[in-house]
Amino acid sequence: MNRCLFFVGCLLAGIMGMLGGPEPVAAAKSYESCVEINDDALRLRCYDEVTGRKTKQPDAPVSALATPPASQAPVVTSGSSVLSRMWQLDNESRRRRFAIMPHRQNYILPYTYNFSQEKETYEKAKPGTELQNAEAKFQISLKMKLWEDIFGTKMDLWAAYTQVSFWQVYNTEHSSPFRETNYEPELLLTYPTNIDLWGLKSRFVQIGINHQSNGRGEPLSRSWNRFTANFGFERDAFNLILKTWVRIPERESQDDNPDITSYLGYGEIWAGTVWKDYSLGLMFRNNLRFDENRSALQCEVIFPLIEYLNGYIQYFIGYGESLIDYNHFTNRIGLGVMVKDW
């Protein structure tokens, strides 16, 4: 096989040599043979060969150096925004259906410290277990487009899944248990928009249905279902997502957390921006009640680390970091890595 490829390569090289470029000049034996050549450039080359002089290639003109050929021009990257790439809102960011993509952030914080860890609920349900303030936290979040351009419109249907876990990995004395894991599948209808609102550009509107639970039995069971409506906005490197929801009522006998909206309210705001190689993020949530006001704030700093991973610092303070802690105050800081969007 290798000999065949070598033979074909030589044959092609020979053909190209015969087809392209000026006719080669035979070795000149005297000045008389050069005189018979009509072409000025070839005649000069003949004289150089007779005298043994090496031909110097002419310098490229300044204009040629200043203007590179079109084949060497840099490739212009897509102007798609962050939200456009996230939800494939324009033609440049469109991809095929059923491709698995990141939904929310995918990260692991090997070490976090909760300055106000609520231990009584878990330890009461698991007698003999003593929780620690230090634990690991990680999140896996993926989505997939199921239906594109529904009924000839620009609307797309997405399925998404997010899982966040809190792991007492350093609590080896009690077998390093998973303190809490939340599972969150959802369906989202996304419609692209392009409306200017108070200096921001509206990029999409979403409606969906969301289920969140911790998969536990009583007394640790927590779950709820919601209708959601999300709105995305951008301005240059700044993006903002307003998430709103309405809880789907449950029968009182099956409701493990009937007062969850009094802690988590009816929505939250996510904002982010990019500064050089760093990304800054902020989440704010409030229950909008004056008598018993409760909030949550999450601050994020993302910085370059290695090829496929970014460094990640997360700070959370307030209510509702997890379902088991929805009615307990949390004050946690963690350091870890985040998977870059693929």
Image (cartoon, rainbow, N blue to C red):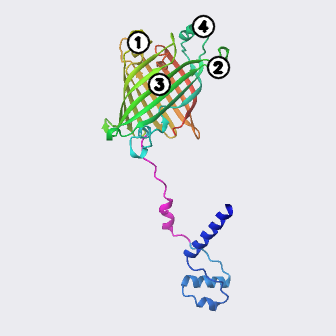
**Amino acid type, mark 1:** Asp
Labels 4 and 1: the sequence-earlier one: 4
Q: CA distance from mark 4 to mark 1?
A: 26 Å
* Residue underneath mark 2: 170
**Amino acid type, mark 4:** Pro
Q: Nearer the viewer, residue 103 or 264?
A: 103
CB of mark 4 within 8 Å of CB of mark 2? Answer: no
Query: What span is colored magenta in the figure?
Result: 59-81
CB of mark 3 within 8 Å of CB of mark 2? Answer: no
Q: Secondary structure at mark 3?
A: strand
Pair 4/2: label in front: 4
* Residue underneath mark 4: 127
Q: Secondary structure at mark 1?
A: loop
Q: CA distance from mark 3 to mark 2?
A: 26 Å
How would you classify the magenta stretch by its main secondary structure? loop
Labels 3 and 4: the sequence-earlier one: 4
Residue drawn at 43 percent across, 36 percent down? 145
Q: CA distance from mark 3 to mark 4?
A: 28 Å
Q: Estimate how packed mark 1 is, as few (under 14), some (14 to 19) or many (20 or more) residues with alpha carbons within 10 Å.
A: few
* Residue underneath mark 1: 259
